[in-house]
Image (cartoon, helix red, strand yellow):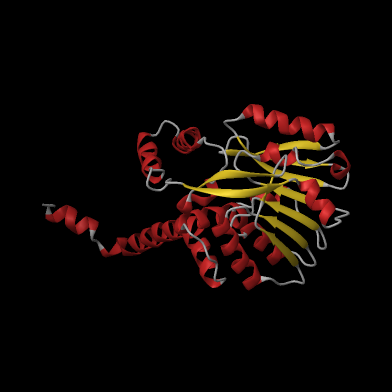
Amino acid sequence: MLSKKYYNYIFNKKFIYFYLFLFIFIFTIAFYYLYINYLAGFIYLKLNNIKYTGIMSAIYIYNEIFLQKDYDILIPNDGWTIFDVGSNIGLYSLYLNDNFKNLNIHTFEPIHQLYQQQSHNINSNIKNNNKIYINNFGLGEKENTEIINFYPYADGLSSINNDMDEKKEHIIDTKSGKNILYRLIFTILLSNNILKSQKEKIKIIRMSEYIRKYNIQKINLIKIDVEGYELNVLEGIDPEHFKIIDNFIIEVENYNPENLQKIKYILRQNNFEIIDHYPNKLWTIISAKK
């Protein structure tokens, strides 16, 4: 029990405004944290009738693109032709669709469920005289069929590579550091139930085959986010087609430095200048410009 002296001191009317200010301050900080981490993405998904499988995965991808602006390391211009390789449910293309006009965007998503969701999301929100061509196959070094590991509730981690254990450990280490509580939280968030995969057979073609088929004369930007398959995508581009490409944005996993060096070698061999961005995050994003 508080003594009467301390009770009167704590609840003195002189402190009411201080308590009120403190409450408003804490509430504002808490609301801002919730908004930038969860509410903004949730509101966007609902207002734009976005279809998705895992809500947290969709919000995470929204935050990367719309709030953190990870891909704004290279800003497009109106009228550009852009390839969105590994387009998921279409959020990067929708970001471009919101902010630029007269674009020709070609998306590549091999997982059928994500392709269907993306088709709905893009066709429901297309504007600014943009044209978006949606493709239900992936890009690689040769025409082929592959088996992909599709994680419905963490679809941004879906990959042809069987490296989820290594990837999960990297995510936990990067997010938690030496904090035991954070490590426990991220271990629970990345539990086997959340990361239960479905195997799906997907179609792969070479990018150069696509370019020839549709007689594409110029590509201003290629964004690649394919969870460890980036090198395969680049190996599907013939030398004459590197000449019609101006810029790349490529997300590469940090725990596979050998893959990153091979990607940089191919780009430099084709006269691109490379800049590393966010090397201390889960993934390094490189921009490559002629």
Which residue sits furthest top? 258
How many tags in the picture?
A: 0
The picture places residue 286, in percent across and down from the top left corner, at 70, 39
Q: Quadrant of residue 22?
A: bottom left
Which quadrant, please, contains the C terminus?
top right
Residue 191 as seen in the image, left or right of residue 160: left
Residue 92 as seen in the image, left or right of residue 100: left
Residue 13 as seen in the image, left or right of residue 131: left
Q: Is residue 32 visible?
A: no
Residue at position x 38%, y 43% in the image: 192
Residue at position x 10%, y 52% in the image: 1
Pick the residue in front: 35 or 229: 229
Residue at position x 86%, y 53% in the image: 218
The picture places residue 245, in percent across and down from the top left corner, at 84, 47
The picture places residue 225, in percent across and down from the top left corner, at 64, 46
Query: Please, is residue 61 above or below residue 271 in the view?
Result: below
Residue at position x 77%, y 72% in the image: 129
The picture places residue 203, in percent across and down from the top left corner, at 64, 49
Pick the residue in front: 198 or 53: 198
Query: Please, is residue 87 above or below residue 24 in the view?
Result: above
Q: Is residue 147 visible?
A: yes
